[in-house]
Amino acid sequence: MTEPTPADQQPVTPTRRDRLRPLELVGFSGVLAVFAALVVLLVLRTSEGVPDFGKAGIVAGIVFIVSLLTVALIGLGTKPSDEDIEARKDLQSPDTDGWH
């Protein structure tokens, strides 16, 4: 079902920075979640005076998800690079031979 690519077209290989970008976002969200969990552990105590690990885990999960979504949406709002603009132009009007 897929069309063979022309021999003159180079395969797209992302740079190392582009490949590691998602890991940076997940790592940043993880750091924020750990920080929030530590704050909850230091502030909230049970009636016996023991740190409340259950609430710390819940807060860490919520902060992780919210920060990941926020960072991803901010990343989507940035201006696309010149290479991305050229790729979008190619997708909007592909060559007529071989395309259906």
Image: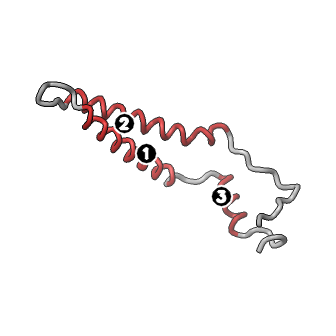
Left or right placement of residue 87 versus residue 74 in this view: right
Residue at point 46%, 50% (across, down): 74
Residue under numbered circle 3: 85
**Residue lying furthest left:** 47
Residue under numbered circle 2: 33
Mark pair 3, 2: CA separation? 35 Å
Residue 100 rendering spot, x and y as whole percentages:
76, 74
Please rate how many residues cluster around mark 1, counting C-alpha atoms within 10 Å: few if below 14, some from 14 to 19, many from 20.
Answer: many
Mark pair 1, 2: CA separation? 10 Å
Amino acid identity at mark 3: Ile
Amino acid identity at mark 1: Leu
Residue 16 rendering spot, x and y as whole percentages:
66, 37
> Residue 32 falls in which quadrant of the image?
top left
Viewer-side residue, 94 vs 65: 65
Question: From the viewer's perspective, is the residue at label 3 or at label 2 nearer?
Answer: 2
| First of labels 3, 2 by sequence position | 2
Residue under numbered circle 1: 68
